[in-house]
Image (spheres, helix red, strand yellow):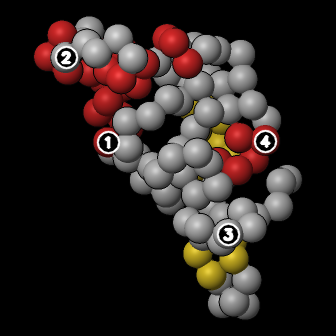
Amino acid sequence: MAGPDPSGAGEDEGDSGEATEHPVLIWCEVCGREDWTTPATAFANGWDFAGPGGLYPLGVVSPRTCGGCTIDKTVWWRLTIERVPPADLTPREQAVIRRILNERSSP
């Protein structure tokens, strides 16, 4: 497992005072792959995902991809790069946004 984020950003302190990172359900919005791990470990394994130790905060529309899928197939890409208005997204893309907005860092 990868070590904690050196900045300590987004980590909770346990009773011992040490920073701990909690696993979350990470998922690829392109291929549908899911894994239960920490965002930092996922990032180390090639995932582009949110959360403590990840690239972005949970609940923010940003890419959710595994190491085998590309960013240009994400909702973030459609909104940010292609400038597709939210109202013009497909039902699947709208479902991805709802899932992102409902993410939480603990079960």
Callout in the foreground (4, 1): 4
Q: Whole-Å distance between the Cαs marked 3 and 1?
A: 25 Å
Who comes first in sequence, dot 3 or dot 1? Answer: 3
- The quadrant holding residue 31 is top right
Count of picture labels: 4
Per the image, the residue denoted by label 1 is: 101
Secondary element at tag 1: helix
Per the image, the residue denoted by label 3 is: 7
Secondary element at tag 2: loop
- The quadrant holding residue 10 is bottom right
Residue found 55% across the figure and 18% down from its top: 71
Q: Where does residue 87 sit, x and y in percent of width and height?
A: 14, 16
Per the image, the residue denoted by label 4 is: 44
Q: Amino acid at mark 2?
A: Pro
Q: Amino acid at mark 1?
A: Leu
Badge 4 local density, few (<14 within 10 Å), some, or many (20+)?
some
Callout in the foreground (3, 1): 3
